[in-house]
Image (tube, helix red, strand yellow):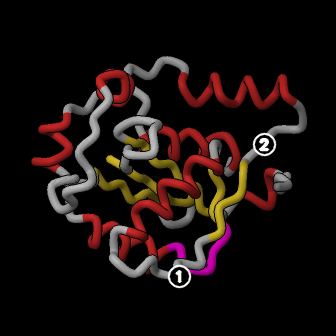
């Protein structure tokens, strides 16, 4: 798989996306997602797992880094169909950028598969990369500096601030 390297100018009005998950294992599931652009603003959803009997694995480390308990996710989260529909309305056919595209593609597929028919979503996620590894490491640090919790909405805000100035 090749990575698309985009310039700052190319990213100005592009959409950025980030998922957070209940863990990193195959039985894990997305618990929150955010996407947006400088022009459109940001949408953020917490995704309830109450609607899927298969979504029951919970990692305490994930809880610690995301700052969300399983009860919070289930009680405050919305139905996955609502999130799928909003994503399709906003992102279908668009280039979407992520710092961690491989994971975000996976969580997108898990969320869309929940629909029961694996919707052909036509959402294209590309990796946001800097020119070299040192810059990419700096980007990762900027995304997570001074944040108490690793949060999808914060990551999208940071990506927009870094790439869409």
Mark 1: secondary structure = loop
* Residue 92 on the magenta span: yes
Residue 123 in the image: x percent, y percent?
Answer: 59, 72
Residue at left offset 20%, top offset 44% = 73
The label on residue 145 is none
Please name the predominant secondary structure of the magenta segment in the image.
Answer: loop
Q: Secondary structure at mark 2?
A: loop
The structure residue drawn at horizontal position 64% and vertical position 50%, both measured from the top left corner, is 101
Which class describes the residues within 10 Å of circle 2: few (<14), some (14-19), or many (20+)? many
Question: Can see residue 45?
Answer: yes
User: Could you tell me if the residues under marks 1 and 2 are in contact, i.e. CB atoms within 8 Å?
Assistant: no
The answer to whether 121 is drawn above or below residue 112 in the figure is below
Residue highlighted by disc 1: 120
Residue 94, placed above or below residue 158: below
Of mark 1 and mark 2, the one earlier in the sequence is: 1
Q: Where 61 sits versus 130, above or below?
A: above
Q: Is residue 112 left or right of residue 137?
A: left
In the image, is 154 to the left or to the right of 100? left
Q: From the image, which quarter does the N terminus lie in?
A: bottom right
Residue 144 image position (x, y, % from top left)? 54, 25
Q: Position of residue 37 (x, y in %)?
A: 56, 60
**What span is colored magenta in the figure?**
91-95
Residue drawn 19% across the image and 37% down it: 70
Q: Is residue 6 visible?
A: no
Q: Position of residue 43 (x, y in %)?
A: 39, 59
How many residues crowd around disc 1 within 10 Å: few (fewer than 14), some, or many (20 or more)?
few
**Does residue 4 appear to the left or right of 70 in the view shown?**
right
Q: At 64% across and 49% down in the image, what residue appears?
A: 102
Q: CA distance from mark 1 to mark 2?
A: 26 Å
The residue at which mark 2 appears reads as: 129
């Amino acid at each position: 798989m090749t990575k698309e390297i985009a310039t700052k100018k190319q990213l100005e009005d592009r959409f950025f996306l980030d998922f957070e998950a209940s863990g990193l294992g195959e039985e894990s599931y997305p618990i929150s997602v955010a996407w947006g652009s400088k022009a459109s603003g940001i949408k953020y959803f917490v995704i309830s797992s109450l609607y899927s009997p298969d979504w029951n694995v919970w990692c305490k480390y994930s809880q610690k880094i995301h700052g969300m308990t399983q009860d919070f996710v289930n009680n405050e989260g919305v139905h996955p169909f609502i999130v799928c529909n909003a994503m399709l309305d906003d992102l279908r056919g668009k280039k979407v950028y992520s710092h961690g595209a491989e994971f975000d593609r996976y969580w997108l597929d898990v969320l869309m598969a929940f629909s029961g028919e694996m919707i052909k979503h036509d959402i294209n996620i590309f990796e946001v990369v800097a020119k070299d590894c040192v810059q990419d490491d700096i980007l990762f640090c900027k995304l997570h500096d001074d944040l108490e919790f690793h949060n999808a909405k914060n990551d999208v805000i940071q990506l927009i601030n870094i790439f869409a100035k």
